Image (tube, rainbow, N blue to C red):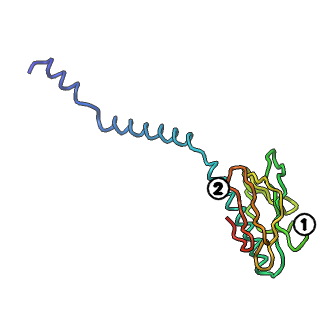
Amino acid sequence: MNSIEKNTLKASRGFSILEVLVILILLGIIGAIVISRGSSADPYILQSQDEIVKSHIRYAQSRALHTASDWGMRFAGSRTYNGRSYSNYWLYKGTDVNTPVRFTVANDGKYVVVFDDNSVGVWPLDIATQTTVTFDRWGSPGSTSITLSVANGSDITILRNTGYIY
């Protein structure tokens, strides 16, 4: 073999394993950055808050069932806190719908806030309906179904007579 053929064979060996690993690691890092910037957690936040509000309604229903007296939730529109507009609601007992009863709620200071008057605010879930839901000692909201309109389209419905919440 002459020297030209030997140099051509040396030049066409390919990449070393170290070079391939470095390229794969760089591609992995770039891919992770692109994927993380392209996805948003907003739909999951709204879905989880929707379930939080449903659980609070179920709590009011449970209190009515276990104490044999009326309990309910008052949905009062929105309330501003730290520059954000929170959907505001509270638990009440009996017929005193304007006096919030304190109940244990995880206050994260951002998505769920417990105000000084014991009412609760959720953000960014926007509950447009201002209404009162009262459960009797049987856990029933009465003879009319109640629907809470939520801006993201995941309305919360409390079925008449049975109190089933979906």
Q: Nearer the viewer, residue 164 or 19?
A: 164
Q: Secondary structure at mark 2?
A: helix
Above or below residue 110? Residue 132 is below
Above or below residue 19? Residue 10 is above
Q: Earlier in the sequence, mark 1 or mark 2?
A: 2
**Residue type beneath disc 1:** Thr
Quarter of the figure with the C terminus: bottom right
Give the side of residue 157 with respect to residue 29, left or right: right
Q: From the image, tell me which residue sits under label 2.
A: 47
User: Which x, y percent locates residue 55?
Assistant: 70, 66
Give the side of residue 154 with respect to residue 65, left or right: left
Q: From the image, tell me which residue sits under label 1.
A: 99
Cα–Cα gap, marks 1 and 2: 28 Å
**Residue type beneath disc 2:** Gln
Above or below residue 15? Residue 51 is below
**CA neighbours of label 2 inside 10 A, class few (<14), some (14 to 19), many (20+):** few
Identified at 71% across, 60% down, the residue is 156
